[in-house]
Amino acid sequence: MSGDGEAARAERRSPRPPDISRAGLERAALGYLERFDSSVANLRRVLRERIRRARQRSSEPVDAEVAKAHIEELLVRYQESGLLDDRRFGANLLLGLRRRGVSSRAARLKLLSKGVAEELVLELMSREAEEAPGDAEFDAALAYVKKRRLGHYRRAKPSAEAAAVEQWQEPERLAPGKSERGLARPIEEHKRGFGNRQGSGRRQGFGRQQGFGRRQSPEARLRDKDLAALARRGFSFDVARRALDTPPEE
């Protein structure tokens, strides 16, 4: 745990109002920028929050307008010196998000939440599409598949689902002369038992997920879960399917 983080938390816990003089605001701004890169709007939000806390805790009147003027002076100076640069901040944040497997839609929302102007967000994402050697959205989806170990990257481990897959495939590995009819009942019983462990299949919508009573293999259920996970991250069905179908590199 960093010393700067400890100091910031101690200040928030302190009953004393934060220092919102010109010097106090500058110390707070530089302390924040030592730990994090920031957009202009985000640093403004951080420093104005300091004013809000000062007004809550101070027993004396607080001139918020003077403090806000000090903040704007700092922001102008930091932009002129290059300490603050929204274009650099947005480009670095977008690159980091994509490498972590974040979709275009989620990345756009993240950039906006960090104070990057919408016009600049659109420009950065257009430039990414032009300069990326391949499909940036697919690359991000594949990065998420690898990170979460979905599809081909799923770790083999003993589980109820793995056992179900093994039993489902068992008729294909019958010994010569072995009757498939003898295995049909145990397999059906296993599948019914697997559904019951999830709760009542019909009450939980389990039957509907299988497609109006159509029997669905455990592999298909796992694939549906993987597709749903990628959809929740903002990836389209086509991109999610391509990412899941891409085998690991040798």
Image (cartoon, rainbow, N blue to C red):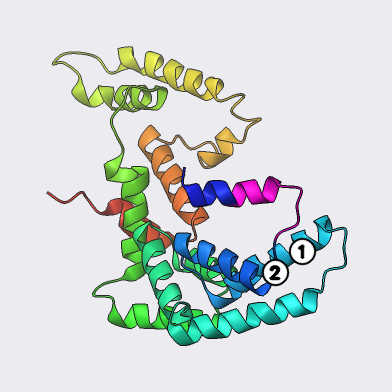
Observer able to see residue 235: no
Camera-side residue: 69 or 88? 69
Give the extent of the magenta segment: 8-18
Q: Is residue 248 above or below residue 52?
A: above
Camera-side residue: 217 or 136? 136
**Helix or strand or loop: what does disc 2 sit on?**
helix
The residue indicated by pointer 2 is 48
Camera-side residue: 249 or 190? 249
Marking on residue 52: 1
Residue 233 in magenta?
A: no
Task: Name the residue type under label 2.
Answer: Arg
Residue pictured at 56% horizontal, 77% vertical? 40
Residue pictured at 44% horizontal, 73% vertical? 89
**Helix or strand or loop: what does disc 1 sit on?**
helix
Total marks placed? 2
Residue 13 in magenta?
A: yes
Q: Quadrant of residue 132?
A: bottom left
Task: Name the residue type under label 1.
Answer: Arg
* Left-right relation of 79 to 144: right
